[in-house]
Image (spheres, rainbow, N blue to C red):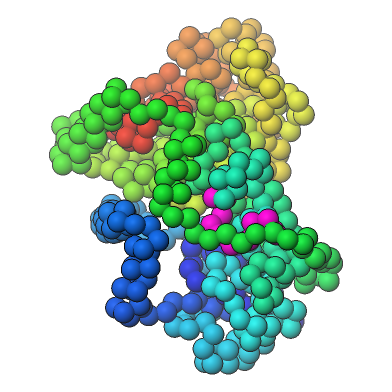
């Protein structure tokens, strides 16, 4: 018999939709009612709210609100004119298109009409996701009660917003909790809780992105255990504190504390040149350039370090958001299969990753799904799943062990539509090793990908990626081993066409500003 679940929310954000979609995938026979609190704001209420914020934040609230308004308007214009897709296809498949999900948009989530509709639905369980504070007459309707996702540790960090006050207080870990809803704010018994580490270079937005994913996982776990009757909730500890939204001064102070990259005149000058070129491109410079495709190469998405193989979590999210708006992201399969290379205002861009670090799964893939961008991951098959196995370049750099992905994680990524290709077995230098060793590495890596993932047409990205790391003789081995393409990493742009066995890529790392990254996408 189907199980009825009601969701209370004030905003159908990506993380809310994804949370519902993931539970819907994991638990069969669920009927959903999503109650969306969307009150109509009168002019009097808007003025009152603005006046309250002005008194709390000072005169700085006026330019802050003006900048926010300009950003929202410009974002809508850009999205309507230049986006290739208005709806994230992952969410369309997992949320909007489902017949078992009904969205009830209401002016008052506690109105009598809403309470009647929810009661008529006869829910077994209620879920609060980014909802206003719920009253007992609503959260007590479901037979089992209502659980809430709170992106913070309780009781120490009740209230809002996620991660801010933990950073403010210099905590080493950030909490995320699913608890039962009662009449006090964030005070109900705990069902599931988790923590994430604050890394050396963590940012507020980066931690919030990570908390979104952790929240999806622990809410799915909580719902599953509750419906199976296996949940064991525990009472919160005594004490604690409830926080409120920070002021503009507090937000600025925290940003100055964790902002690590100095802004120099040189950086501002370079960004000015990049921005000027990007503007010229969109207003006609692209007509003068030869048709081209840019393939970007990333390695790691992490806030644990900053080096020439790493970008930050928030930084990668910004990169993908900008590429989605201003470029045409395509898959590597499309490129080598004859994707038309033509002059276009929106640069054609392909995203790739090398090596197989764990953060590709935990951070990069989740952000790519969020922005509905295809990508390819080239992995060293002998290192995948190996414990304490170092990449040769990490040994040379004397890096501490950096975790790599497991095969089950690669299988999940493959199911999401990401291409998984070969980066040899042991991350060898193909030009330096003997013909026999290279041949064995090529054959074994391709065979492993076929066995583990069912991949038939396998692409190859050779390690280190320099001109000196691949020879014509070794490239013939790549072809003879059955690979359908070969990617380098020494820069360059694919002009007029894409040679499947000489796909040029440009590396991106943490020192690339947003404008510098977009400039790379132009391929000039």
Name the residue located 51 percent from the left edge and 88 percent from the top edge: 111
Q: Is residue 166 magenta?
A: no
Q: Locate residue 521, reporting x and y percent.
A: 33, 34
Q: Locate residue 305, reporting x and y percent.
A: 57, 28
Asked if residue 4 is positioned above or below residue 212 in the image, the reply reads below
Q: Which residues are magenta?
A: 154-164
Name the residue located 61 percent from the left edge and 14 percent from the top edge: 397
Asked if residue 462 is positioned above or below residue 96 in the image, the reply reads above
The quarter of the picture where residue 347 lies is top left
The quarter of the picture where residue 408 lies is top right
Asked if residue 231 is positioned above or below residue 348 in the image, the reply reads below
Q: Locate residue 190, reporting x and y percent.
A: 75, 64
Q: Locate residue 504, reporting x and y percent.
A: 40, 25
Q: Would residue 330 be visible to someone looking at this image?
A: no
The rendered magenta stretch, by its main secondary structure, is classed as loop
State left or right for residue 310 relative to residue 177.
left
Q: Nearer the viewer, residue 365 or 446?
A: 365
Classify the position of the N terminus by image quarter. Answer: bottom right
Name the residue located 52 percent from the left edge and 82 percent from the top edge: 109
State left or right for residue 273 relative to residue 353.
left
Name the residue located 48 percent from the left edge and 55 percent from the top edge: 246
Q: Nearer the viewer, residue 12 or 330?
A: 12
Classify the position of the C terminus by image quarter. Answer: top left
Counting every numbered tag in the picture gives 0
Q: Would residue 36 be visible to someone looking at this image?
A: yes
């Amino acid at each position: 018999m189907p199980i009825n679940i009601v969701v209370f929310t004030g905003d159908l954000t990506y993380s809310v939709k994804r949370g519902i979609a993931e539970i819907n995938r994991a638990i069969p026979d669920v009927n959903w009612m999503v109650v969306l609190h969307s009150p109509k704001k009168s002019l009097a209420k808007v003025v009152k709210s603005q006046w309250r914020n002005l008194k709390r934040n000072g005169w700085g609230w006026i330019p802050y609100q003006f900048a926010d308004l300009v950003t929202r308007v410009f974002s809508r214009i850009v999205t309507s004119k230049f986006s290739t897709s208005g709806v994230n296809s992952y969410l369309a498949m997992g949320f909007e298109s489902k017949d078992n999900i009904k969205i009830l948009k209401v002016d008052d989530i506690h109105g009598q009409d809403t309470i009647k509709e929810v009661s008529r639905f006869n829910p077994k369980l209620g879920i609060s996701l980014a909802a206003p504070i719920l009253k007992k007459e609503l959260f007590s309707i479901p037979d089992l009660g209502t659980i809430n996702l709170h992106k913070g540790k309780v009781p120490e960090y009740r209230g809002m917003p996620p991660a801010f006050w933990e950073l403010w207080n210099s905590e080493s870990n950030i909490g995320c909790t699913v608890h039962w809803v009662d009449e006090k704010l964030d005070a109900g018994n705990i069902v599931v809780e988790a923590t994430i580490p604050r890394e050396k270079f963590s940012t507020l937005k980066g931690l919030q992105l990570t908390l979104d994913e952790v929240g999806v996982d622990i809410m799915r776990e909580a719902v599953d255990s509750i419906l199976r009757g296996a949940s064991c909730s525990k009472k919160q500890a005594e004490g604690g504190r409830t926080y409120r939204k920070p002021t503009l001064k507090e937000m600025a102070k925290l940003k100055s504390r964790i902002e690590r990259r100095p802004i120099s005149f040189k950086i501002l000058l370079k960004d000015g040149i990049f921005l000027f070129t990007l503007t010229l491109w969109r207003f006609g410079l692209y007509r003068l350039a030869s048709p081209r495709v840019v393939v970007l190469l990333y390695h790691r998405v992490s806030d644990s370090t900053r080096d020439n193989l790493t970008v930050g979590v928030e930084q990668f999210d910004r990169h993908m958001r900008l590429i989605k708006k201003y470029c045409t992201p395509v898959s590597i399969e499309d490129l080598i299969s004859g994707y038309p290379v033509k002059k276009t205002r929106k640069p054609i861009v392909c995203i790739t990753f090398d090596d197989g670090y764990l953060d590709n799964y935990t951070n990069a893939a989740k952000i790519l799904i969020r922005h509905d961008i295809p990508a390819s991951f080239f992995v060293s098959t002998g290192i995948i799943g190996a414990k304490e196995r170092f990449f040769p370049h990490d040994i040379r750099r004397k890096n501490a062990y950096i975790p790599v992905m497991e095969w089950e994680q690669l299988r999940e990524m493959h199911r999401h539509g990401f291409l998984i290709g070969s980066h040899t077995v042991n991350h060898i230098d193909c030009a330096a090793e003997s013909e026999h060793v290279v041949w064995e590495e090529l054959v074994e890596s391709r065979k492993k990908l076929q066995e583990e993932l069912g991949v038939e047409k396998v692409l190859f990205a050779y390690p280190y990626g320099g001109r000196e790391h691949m020879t014509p003789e070794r490239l013939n081995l790549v072809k003879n081993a059955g690979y359908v393409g070969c990617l380098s990493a020494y820069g360059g742009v694919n002009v007029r066409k894409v040679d499947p066995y000489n796909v040029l890529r440009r590396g991106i790392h943490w020192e690339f500003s947003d404008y510098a990254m977009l400039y790379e996408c132009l391929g000039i």
